[in-house]
Each structure stands twice: as C-alpha cells, then as structure tokens.
Image (cartoon, helix red, strand yellow):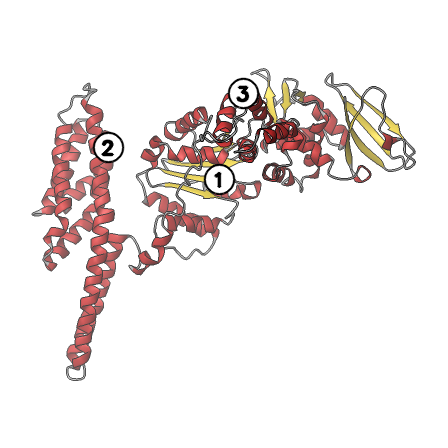
C-alpha cells in the first residue's frame, strides 16, 4: 500500500518526475523478476522514505533559486532507472551477470544514501548558517528603524520567527540532529567505539577467525556469541582481528561498536559512547531503561546495515548489562569476550591455547628481531623455552620480550628458571591476569576452596568428575547437587575444562561417570600458590606431598595440629585418619 501511495505523491515535473519514474521501474521489476528481490526491496523502501523530504527540498530550492543543489542526486536517479531496467532483462539462469548487477544495485543504494547523509547534510548546514547570517543582518536593519516604524518592525519579527521554525525543521531533516551547534561539540568524540588496531599480527588464529566469521556472517542462529578462555589466551586480540576482516567490515560497515566493559560497567555510559561514536545528539536519559530504549531506536535508524556490538572483557558483575542489550532486531549481533561463559546469554566459543608450532612462531617474532646482531639460540633451547610458556600468548609475550636482544648466558639462566610452571607465575603481568579470575571467587568461599583442591592432583591428568563431586561433598558438607554446581561454576570461569568421553552421556540423570576434568598447568600452579599463600599454621587447607613413609617435620613438632587427611587417588580410593591430639580440625590436601 505504501508504494502505491508514494508514486502519486511524487507526481510533478522535473526532478520529482524522475524520482517517481525510478520508483515505478523498481516496482515493475520487483513484480516480474524475483532474482534481485532483496536489493530492489531495500531500494524501494529507501526511495519511499526519502520522498516527502526530497519534495520539500525541491520546493525550497525553487523558492530560493538553487536548482543545482540536487543535480548530483538527479544524476543518480537517472542512472538508477537505467540500471534497474537492465536488471529486468537478465535471465534468472544467467549466473555470470546476476552477481555483477546485484553488486551494482548495492552500490547504487549506497551512493544515494551517502549523498543524502553527507553531501546534502553539509549543504543543509551551510544553507542554514547562511540564512541565519542574513536573518541577523535583517534584524540589525529592523532594529535601526524600529523606533520609526514600530508596526512594520513587529511584522518583520513575526516573519523572522516563522522563518526560524522552518529553518529548524529543515535542519532536523537534513542533519538528524536537534541543533547545528551540537555537531561541533560532539565531532571530536566521533569514532570512540571503533575497533582498536592490532599491535602485532596474530598467530594461530586462522581456525578461530574462520569459525567465528561464519557465525557472524552466515549463521543466523548465532546472534549472541561469547568468546571464553582463561586470562592471557588472546580473547581481545581475536575479537580485534575479527573486526579487521574485510568480509566483516563489508557486512557491518561503520556499525561496528567495540567497547571495553570493565572500564565502563555503567550501562548509561556505554549508550552515551555509542551515540557519540555515531556523532548523534545525546538525549537526556532519565534512567537505564530509557537509555536502552534510545539505543534500540538508534540501532533501528542506522539500518539497513547490520550492527555488531563487541563487548570486551566482561566480568560476572556486568552480566545484567548483556541481557539488557539484547534487542529483537534483524542483522544485530553481540560478540562478548570473557573469562566466563555466560551460558544463559548466548553460545560459547572456547578459545584454546596455541599449539606448539604456532607458539614457536609467535615467540620468534617477539624474542628474535631480524637484525643480525642479536643472539639466536639453537632450536632445542628455543623449543624448550616455548614449552615453558604453555601456549598462553600473554606468557609468550612476557617471556619473549624479557629475552629480546639478551645474551646466551641470559637465555640459559632464564630457561632454568622457567623449567617449572611456578616460576612463570612470578611474572607480575601473568600472575595478575590469572589471579584476578580466582579473586573474583572471594564471595564464593567454597568454590574457591574447590579450585585450590585441584592442585592436589598430578599434573596433566584427567580427573574423574565423580571423584571431585564426592570429595567436595565430604570436605565441605555439601549435597551432590551443590558439589556439581561448584564444578560447573569453575568450568564457566574457564578455571577447569570438563570433557565428556561419550557423546550420549546425559547429565540430567545425575550420572557423571563419563565426565572428566582437566586443568591447564599454569592454573594448577596458581591453585597451589593460592593454597600456600599463608603460613602452614594459619591455613584452612594445605597441600602435602607424601613420599613412602616420610612425614613432614611440622607434623611431629610439639604444637601438633589435628588434621583430617583426605587422599584421593586416581583409582578414586578415599581414606581418613586423625593425627595429633583432639583440637581444632583442619583439612589437609595430600597427593602421591
């Protein structure tokens, strides 16, 4: 119905007639040729939306004797009419010409939209300022003769007020802002949500980039995606690289918004930054709900281009923000990076550490500059050093930078230091990155204790999930469901990985016999470090390594402590015994 009403509304002479002709041709081709339907429907909608304002502009131009203002747009309309007519002659089985002309239709739509949004907007601002200047001259002249011709002055003032109203309406139509001055005040903030530039070329991200680009570009079911991994695995780098892909930039154009959430947290600040990024006048938000409603309207206005909202480094305290930003819009996607999976928000994509080959390549880029003056270690030393980094890009970067342009002696010394995973954790940047994830568990004391229990198990070993569930139920007086909830809580935070060995294994029946837990070496060392952070006499729990019948000296000292020792072996055997006099009971983790 809208299309039939728009055509007579445009009937007239000159430019309006050409505008009407283009719409008529589009409607005819749409009816008889379906192979260009999506592109033609967008073109039709754009023309119909433009019609009322274009008619007003043409009227103003006639009165102001400025016919040249729409000459370029008139040429685009003429070219568009010819292009659509050519499309109608292309057979649906012509696979060579069909994509070519589809691209031409997309370019025509973009050229018209850009001309309206940029050229005419600037012309509108210039015309408005010119009118305001002439208006000021008129007012000055009126004021000079006001005392003599009071009645005439009143009439002029009334006419000026009417003129101001018309100017305001025209300016709003052309520039999509409430005041011309707001353009100058906000322009320095435009682009604040642009994706950051890559500091280094990523290594080993080919598969993740390919899989995630498919989710963004082709998978309509993946509207909300969470890239999750432990700290230091390169989640932000991956999201940044994804935004730099040509296919992604072509689809989302200027509608990619990249925000770091921990630095903002406040939802209203996020919305304000997006408005500033698009160089739009900031509304006066009354509440978070009001801000969200304005943002949804903005996303609808900036279509038909798809919108990609990237929220980087989101923590559990900000999960409510994610759900408030869910809009029922077509071609709208949210990409989140986090150490947590947020299963209630969207589909999770787990980023793995680098494999050995990619880790070596990345380490060489950082530690071995191309100049011939720097020391280059032999291949064995290089590979052993890389193994110490456990595939974590952050660790590789920290260790690699510390060895850049260092001597052979320094390399040998550093290799000896890095042979144990615990020494890697002495690097403040790495430790702070990983430890902050554990510290977030401070308000969940039992979950943090469960994490530290994992340091009691041998390195690089699959731990039966049933062993952990039974152990935690016994140690912390939990029922089975509470123990299972702690298991999932650690998994959601990427502090452990749960592996299911049989595809048809079902958690609903309460059986976890086919579930196993693994943990990255660095995270295991961090669990041990957390357990050993206090003196033995002040620890609520302790790690104790028992070799044969050798007992630690502190167990035989005068001030013996009562200890409930729980040993969980790989065979899932469990026993308990008492050591020392009856006093305060303390849990002791032991491993063999």
Please give the label number shown on residue 379. 3
Task: Look at 34% across and 30% down and name the residue there.
Answer: 247
| Label 2 vs 3, first from the N-terminus | 2
Please give the label number shown on residue 312. 1
Packing grade of label 1 (10 A; few <14, some 14-19, many >=20) is many
In this picture, residue 325 sits left or right of residue 425? left
| Residues marked 2 and 3 touching at CB (< 8 Å) | no
Picture quarter containing residue 512? Answer: top right
| Label 3 vs 1, first from the N-terminus | 1
Packing grade of label 2 (10 A; few <14, some 14-19, many >=20) is some
Q: Quadrant of the C terminus?
A: top right
Q: Which residue is mark 2?
A: 39
Q: Position of residue 585 (x, y in %)?
A: 84, 35
Q: Position of residue 555 (x, y in %)?
A: 87, 31
| Residues marked 1 and 2 touching at CB (< 8 Å) | no
Residue 343 at least partly seen: no
Q: CA distance from mark 3 to mark 1?
A: 37 Å
Picture quarter containing residue 166? Answer: bottom left
Q: Residue most toward the left? A: 13
In this picture, residue 204 sits left or right of residue 53? right
């Amino acid at each position: 119905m809208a299309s039939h009403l728009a055509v007579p509304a445009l009937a007239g002479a000159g430019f309006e007639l050409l505008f009407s002709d283009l719409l008529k041709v589009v409607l005819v081709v749409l009816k008889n040729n379906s192979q260009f339907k999506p592109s033609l429907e967008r073109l039709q909608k754009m023309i119909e939306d433009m019609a009322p304002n274009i008619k007003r502009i043409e009227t103003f131009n006639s009165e102001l004797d400025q016919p040249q203002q729409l000459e370029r747009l008139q040429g685009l309309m003429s070219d568009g009419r010819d292009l659509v007519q050519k499309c109608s002659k292309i057979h649906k089985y012509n696979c060579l010409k069909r994509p070519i002309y589809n691209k031409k239709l997309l370019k025509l739509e973009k050229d018209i939209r850009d001309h309206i949004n940029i050229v005419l907007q600037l012309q509108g601002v210039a015309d408005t300022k010119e009118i305001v200047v002439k208006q000021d001259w008129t007012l000055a002249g009126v004021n000079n003769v006001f005392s003599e011709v009071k009645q005439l002055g009143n009439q002029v003032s009334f006419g000026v007020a009417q003129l101001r109203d018309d100017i305001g309406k025209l300016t709003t139509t052309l520039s999509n802002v409430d005041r011309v001055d707001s353009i100058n005040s906000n322009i320095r903030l435009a682009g604040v949500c642009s994706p950051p530039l890559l500091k280094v070329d990523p290594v080993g991200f080919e598969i993740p980039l390919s899989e995630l680009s498919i989710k963004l570009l082709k998978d309509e079911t993946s509207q909300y995606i969470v890239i999750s991994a432990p700290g230091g695995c390169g989640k932000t780098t991956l999201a940044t690289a994804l935004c730099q892909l040509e296919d992604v930039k072509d689809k989302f154009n200027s509608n990619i918004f990249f925000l770091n959430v921990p630095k903002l947290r406040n939802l209203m600040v996020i919305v304000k930054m997006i408005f500033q990024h698009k160089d739009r006048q900031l509304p006066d938000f009354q509440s978070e709900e009001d801000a969200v409603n304005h943002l949804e309207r903005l996303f609808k206005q900036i279509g038909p281009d798809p919108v990609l909202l990237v929220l980087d480094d989101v923590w559990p305290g900000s999960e409510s923000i994610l759900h408030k930003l869910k809009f029922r819009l077509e071609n709208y996607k949210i990409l989140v990076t986090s150490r947590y999976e947020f299963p209630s928000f969207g589909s999770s994509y787990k980023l793995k550490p680098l494999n050995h080959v990619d880790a070596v390549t990345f380490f060489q880029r950082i530690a071995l500059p191309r100049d011939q003056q720097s020391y280059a270690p032999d291949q064995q030393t290089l590979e052993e050093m890389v193994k110490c980094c456990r595939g974590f890009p952050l660790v590789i970067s920290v260790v690699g930078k510390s060895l850049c342009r260092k001597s052979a002696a320094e390399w040998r010394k550093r290799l000896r230091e890095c042979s144990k995973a615990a020494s890697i954790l002495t690097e403040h940047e790495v430790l702070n990155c990983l430890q902050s994830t554990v510290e977030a568990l401070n308000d969940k004391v039992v979950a943090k204790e469960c994490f530290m229990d994992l340091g009691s198990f041998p390195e690089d070993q699959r731990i039966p999930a049933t062993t952990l569930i039974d152990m935690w139920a016994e140690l912390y007086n939990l029922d089975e469901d509470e123990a299972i909830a702690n298991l999932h809580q650690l998994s959601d935070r990427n502090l452990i990985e749960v592996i299911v060995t049989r595809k048809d294994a079902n958690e609903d029946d309460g059986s976890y016999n086919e579930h196993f837990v693994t943990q990255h070496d660095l995270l295991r060392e961090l669990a041990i470090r957390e357990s050993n952070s206090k003196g033995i006499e002040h620890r609520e729990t302790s790690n104790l390594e028992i070799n044969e019948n050798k007992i630690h000296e502190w167990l035989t000292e005068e001030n013996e402590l009562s200890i409930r020792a729980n040993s969980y072996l790989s065979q899932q055997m469990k026993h308990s015994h008492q050591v020392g006099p009856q006093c305060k009971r303390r849990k002791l983790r032991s491993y063999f």
